Image (cartoon, rainbow, N blue to C red):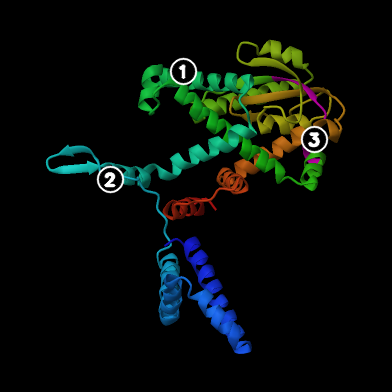
C-alpha cells in the first residue's frame, strides 16, 4: 500500500477511535445520554461491528503498518543502488549459435563502456549551448578547424575527407562539426573559469614585470634547418659571430646585411608588443637592448642564430588598456600549468547547474572518473 494511503487510513482510524473515547466520557457523565448515544452509534450494525473488530485487532493492525514501514526503511538502507534499466529489455536483438543477445545485454555493455562520456556530452551540451550560443563567428572558426583536420590527414596520411570522417566514427560532417562545437564550448568555459581565479595582485605583478611599450627591431638570421648536424649548427653560429665582429669593427647594420645577403636572411619586424608571438629568446634580447644597439652574441631560436638590432621603443601602455590581455595571458598560463583544469572547471559547471544522478551506479562511475583528475 502506498505511504500516502497508509497515512490517510491511519488518520481515519485515529479519528474514529477519538469519537469512541468521547462517547465513553459522555456515558460516564450522563447515563440517560448513554442509551441515546448507543442507539446512534449502533444505528448501522456494520459500523458497530467495525469498531468492535478494530478494538479487538488494533495492536495487530498497528504492527502490520509498522512492519511495512520498517521493511521500506531497511530496503533503502541495505540496497541503496538505483539503477536505470530498460522497461522491457528481454527482447532479443541478435542470435548466433545458441547465443541470444537481448536489449538488456546490449544496453548493459554499452552503459559500461560508453556511459560516462556519452552522458557528459549530453549534459555539457545542454548547459554550454545556453552559456555560449551559436554565432557566425563560432561557425566560421569551427569550419576552418575542420578543414585543417581534413588537409593535415590528406597531406600526411593520404586520407580523404570522407574516409577521415568514417574512420573517426562520424556519420557526417555535421556530426564532426557538433563534436568540435562541444570541444570549443568546453574550452571556452575552462578559459573563463581560469580567468575567475586570477587575482588583482597577479595582474599587477605581471603588468609591472612583463608589460612594456612596443619595440621596433630588425634582424639578420643565419638559418639552421631542423635536420642540421652539430657541425652545420656550429658553422652557422660562427658565421653569426663573424657578422657581429664586423659590426664591432664599425660597419653599419645595413652594410653587413648587404655583405652577407647571400648566406643570411634579413627582416624588419617593426613594432612588437609584450604579448607578441615571438620566441622568448628574441623577446628577452630586444628588451635588454637599448635603442640603436645590436646583439653582442648570437641569439639562438628554433630558426637559427639572430643578430638583433633595436631601433626604438614606444611608451608603456596603461594597465587599463592592457588589463584584459593580461588576464588572458595569465589564464592561458594557469591552464597550461594544470592539466586537470578542464576537468575541474567542468565538474564545477555541472554542480552549479544542479546535476543530480538518479542512477547510483553511474554516479559512482562519475565520481571515479573525476577522482582521476584531482
Residue 170 spot, x, y in % from top left: 40, 26
- Which mark sits nearer the N-terminus, 1 or 3? 1
* Pointer 1 with pointer 2, Cβ within 8 A: no
Other-residue count near label 2 (Cα within 10 Å), few / some / many at <14 / 14–19 / ≥20: some
Q: Quadrant of residue 29?
A: bottom right
Q: Is residue 162 above or below residue 75?
A: above
Disc 3: which residue: 323
Q: What residue sits 62% from the left and 16% below the top? A: 264
Disc 1: which residue: 151
Other-residue count near label 3 (Cα within 10 Å), few / some / many at <14 / 14–19 / ≥20: some
- Which mark sits nearer the N-terminus, 2 or 3? 2
Q: Which quadrant holds the N terminus?
A: bottom left
- Identify the secondary structure beneath mark 3: helix
Residue 289 spot, x, y in % from top left: 79, 30
Q: Which residues are magenta?
A: 209-219
* Residue at mark 1 to residue at mark 3: CA–CA distance: 37 Å
Disc 2: which residue: 105
Q: Is residue 262 above or below residue 43?
A: above
* Residue at mark 1 to residue at mark 2: CA–CA distance: 41 Å
- Which mark sits nearer the N-terminus, 1 or 2? 2
Marks 2 and 3: which is nearer the front? 2
Amino acid at each position: 500500500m502506498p505511504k500516502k494511503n497508509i497515512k490517510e487510513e491511519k488518520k481515519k482510524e485515529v479519528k474514529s477511535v477519538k469519537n469512541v473515547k468521547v462517547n465513553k466520557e459522555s456515558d460516564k457523565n450522563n447515563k440517560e445520554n448513554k442509551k441515546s448515544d448507543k442507539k446512534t452509534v449502533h444505528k448501522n450494525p456494520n459500523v458497530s461491528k467495525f469498531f468492535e473488530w478494530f478494538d479487538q485487532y488494533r495492536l495487530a493492525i498497528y504492527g502490520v503498518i509498522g512492519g511495512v514501514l520498517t521493511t521500506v526503511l531497511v530496503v533503502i538502507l541495505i540496497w541503496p543502488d538505483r539503477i536505470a534499466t530498460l522497461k522491457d529489455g528481454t527482447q532479443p536483438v541478435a542470435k548466433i549459435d545458441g547465443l541470444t543477445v537481448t536489449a538488456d545485454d546490449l544496453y548493459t555493455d554499452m552503459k559500461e563502456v560508453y556511459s560516462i562520456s556519452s552522458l557528459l556530452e549530453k549534459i555539457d551540451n545542454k548547459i554550454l549551448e545556453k552559456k555560449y550560443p551559436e554565432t557566425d563567428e563560432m561557425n566560421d572558426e569551427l569550419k576552418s578547424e575542420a578543414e585543417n583536420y581534413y588537409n593535415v590527414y590528406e597531406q600526411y596520411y593520404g586520407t580523404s575527407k570522407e574516409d577521415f570522417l568514417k574512420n573517426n566514427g562520424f556519420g557526417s560532417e555535421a556530426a564532426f562539426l557538433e563534436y568540435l562545437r562541444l570541444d570549443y564550448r568546453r574550452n571556452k568555459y575552462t578559459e573563463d573559469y581560469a580567468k575567475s581565479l586570477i587575482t588583482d595582485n597577479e595582474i599587477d605583478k605581471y603588468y609591472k614585470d612583463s608589460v612594456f611599450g612596443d619595440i621596433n627591431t630588425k634582424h639578420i638570421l643565419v638559418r639552421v634547418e631542423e635536420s642540421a648536424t652539430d657541425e652545420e649548427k656550429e658553422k652557422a653560429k660562427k658565421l653569426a659571430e663573424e657578422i657581429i665582429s664586423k659590426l664591432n669593427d664599425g660597419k653599419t647594420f645595413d652594410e653587413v646585411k648587404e655583405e652577407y645577403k647571400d648566406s643570411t636572411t634579413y627582416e624588419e619586424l617593426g613594432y612588437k608588443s609584450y604579448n607578441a608571438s615571438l620566441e622568448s629568446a628574441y623577446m628577452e634580447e630586444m628588451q635588454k637592448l637599448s635603442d640603436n644597439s645590436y646583439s653582442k652574441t648570437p641569439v639562438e631560436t628554433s630558426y637559427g642564430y639572430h643578430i638583433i638590432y633595436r631601433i626604438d621603443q614606444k611608451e608603456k601602455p596603461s594597465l587599463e588598456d592592457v588589463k584584459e590581455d593580461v588576464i588572458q595571458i595569465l589564464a592561458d598560463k594557469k591552464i597550461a600549468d594544470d592539466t586537470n583544469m578542464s576537468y575541474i572547471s567542468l565538474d564545477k559547471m555541472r554542480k552549479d547547474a544542479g546535476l543530480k544522478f538518479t542512477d547510483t551506479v553511474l554516479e559512482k562511475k562519475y565520481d571515479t572518473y573525476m577522482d582521476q583528475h584531482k
